[in-house]
Image: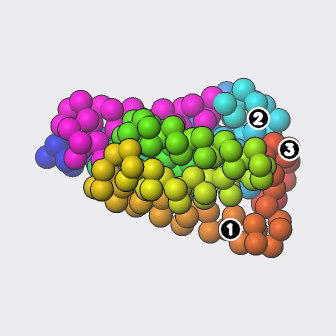
Amino acid sequence: MEFLITAMAAYLLGSVPFGIVVARIFGLGDVRKIGSGNIGATNVLRTGSKLAAFLTLVLDAGKGAVAVLVARAYGGEELAGLAALCAMLGHVFPIFLKFKGGKGVATFLGTLLAISWPTGLAACATWLLAAAITRYSSLSALIAAALAPVFALYFYHLHGAVLIGLLSVLIYIRHSANIRRLIAGEEPKIGKVASKSNS
């Protein structure tokens, strides 16, 4: 029963679309109708509001971290791992948006920081470095996701690395369109302001 409760609570928390909520509070409209159509911080940034994008980043990361920390306090590492997976599933397949959610990068990093903070810090640093060099949020996320299980093997343990590998697979699945645009040279860079859908 505790596993079911944890899974449902983490999924529902992960399903909260903070990008949409924050954008509406700031009067920015529906972020699903601009830029890439994604509900995450990178697309919110394309509205031109850095504060809204920052708040979306913090809240999306925070919901993953909170899910893990509460589950760990309640039932240990097994529940923490389950909460991480379900929070990610909630973000990328949210019940509140007919299962059409975000790419999961901020939530992914938030869960990593809560599961194993050295692993999370290494993944965040990887994203930041890749973003500074390439200016592509999606490519930076893909690089960080690919290396995260490796970091977990070093800083955490094998079972944790397997879990993080599953989370990384979700990142790659949700970035399939970005991968195609990167190959075609059509992927928008970080901070590009957009007003039309499907840039």
Q: Is residue 163 visible?
A: no
- Between residue 72 and residue 20, name the one nearer to us: 72
Residue at horizontal 49 percent and vertical 47 percent from the top: 108
- Picture coordinates of residue 75, whole percent (x, y): 18, 37
Q: Secondary structure at mark 1?
A: helix
Amino acid type, label 3: Val
Label 1 Cα neighbours within 10 Å, binned few <14 / some 14-19 / many ≥20: some
- Picture coordinates of residue 165, whole percent (x, y): 41, 60
- Which numbered tag is attached to residue 179? 1
**How many numbered circles are shown?**
3
Please give the residue where the numbered disc 2 appears in the rendered image: 28
Report, in whole angstroms, how far the alpha carbon at label 1 lies from the one at label 2: 27 Å
Q: Could you tell which of marks 2 and 3 lies nearer the N-terminus?
A: 2
Q: Secondary structure at mark 3?
A: loop
Q: Secondary structure at mark 2?
A: loop
Residue at horizontal 48 percent and vertical 32 percent from the top: 62
* Left or right: 29 in relation to 94: right
Report the span colored magenta: 55-81
Please give the residue where the numbered disc 3 appears in the rendered image: 193
Amino acid type, label 2: Leu
Residue at horizontal 30 percent and vertical 56 percent from the top: 158
Q: Is residue 76 visible?
A: yes
Q: Is residue 136 above or below residue 175?
A: above
Mark 2 vs mark 3, foreground winner is 3
Q: Is residue 197 above or below residue 42?
A: below
Q: Could you tell which of marks 1 and 2 lies nearer the N-terminus?
A: 2
- Which numbered tag is attached to residue 150? none
* Left or right: 85 in relation to 122: left
